[in-house]
Amino acid sequence: MLWTNKQTDKYTDSNVLPMTNKIGMDNNNNNNNNNNNVSLVSAGIPATKEPVGLLKSDGKRPDGLILVPWQSGKPLTWDVTVAHTLAASYVSSTACEAGAVAEMAATLKSSKYADLSYSHHFQRIAFKTLGSMNSSAVSFFRDLGHRISQVSGDSREAYYLFQHIAVTTQRFNSVLLRDSFVAHESQDDSDA
């Protein structure tokens, strides 16, 4: 049996992860959102996922909300996005600056939830499929790791948090890579 990649990048003729696998990307986003929620709870901060009613005008829901003040007396809301670094629309940004795709995705999230900034501290969290994240997310996870360390007594919690994020990203990249291949019957297989 011969295995080939479903999609080839038109710019480099190299194999790329398919963006057609929406389920894999959604699972990656959901898993990263679950990681945020679990991490907040580990720090002793009560949180809920996908709160309803924060934006009454259009029904948009961020991925999560903490139930106590986070910064400047405002509760924290967050939204996670995973951007496919090698997608045609991002190739030029990726080639110019490391992390540019994550910053672009984070900026889009900020504009989507701009109305929340009056009542909530909004944390945009954008991951790239190749591993980096936007700079404000790095600061957020460092702070969160420090808060978890205060509860657990282990000074390495921020390191563990970043490691967990990296493993989650690699895990879902492997799913996307696996799903990008299709089996083709070769002549030798059809004779057997």
Image (spheres, rainbow, N blue to C red):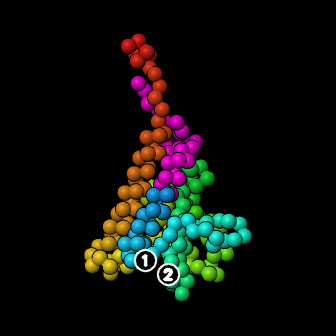
Q: Are marks 2 and 1 in contact (CB under 8 Å)?
A: yes
- The reply to whether residue 89 is visible in this rendering is yes
Look at label 1 and name its amino acid: Ile
Q: Quadrant of the C terminus?
A: top left
Position of 81 relative to 4 (above/below)? below
Which residues make up the magenta segment? 1-29
Position of 105 relative to 89 (above/below)? below
Residue at (67% x, 75% y) in the render: 115
Q: Is residue 20 magenta?
A: yes
From the viewer's perspective, tell me whether residue 94 is left or right of residue 110: left
Q: Residue extending furthest bottom?
A: 72
- Name the spot of residue 8 as percent of width and height, x first: 53, 39
Q: Using the image as rendered, state which of residue 183 and residue 44 is in the foreground.
A: 44
Q: Quadrant of the N terminus?
A: top left
- Name the spot of residue 71 as percent of width and height, x first: 51, 84
Q: How many marks?
A: 2
Secondary structure of residue under mark 1? loop
Residue at (57% x, 59% y) in the render: 93
Residue at (29% x, 76% y) in the render: 152
- Name the spot of residue 43 as percent of width and height, x first: 38, 76
Look at label 2 and name its amino acid: Val
Labelled disc at residue 77: none
Q: Is residue 96 magenta?
A: no
Secondary structure of residue under mark 2? strand
Labelled disc at residue 45: 1
Labelled disc at residue 68: 2
Q: Using the image as rendered, state which of residue 47 and residue 152 is in the foreground.
A: 47
- Name the spot of residue 11 as percent of width and height, x first: 57, 45
Q: CA distance from mark 2 to mark 1?
A: 7 Å
Instruction: Classify 10 Å Cα crowding around label 1: few (below 14), some (14-19), many (20 and above).
Output: some
Instruction: Classify 10 Å Cα crowding around label 2: few (below 14), some (14-19), many (20 and above).
Output: few
Q: Using the image as rendered, state which of residue 89 and residue 66 is in the foreground.
A: 66
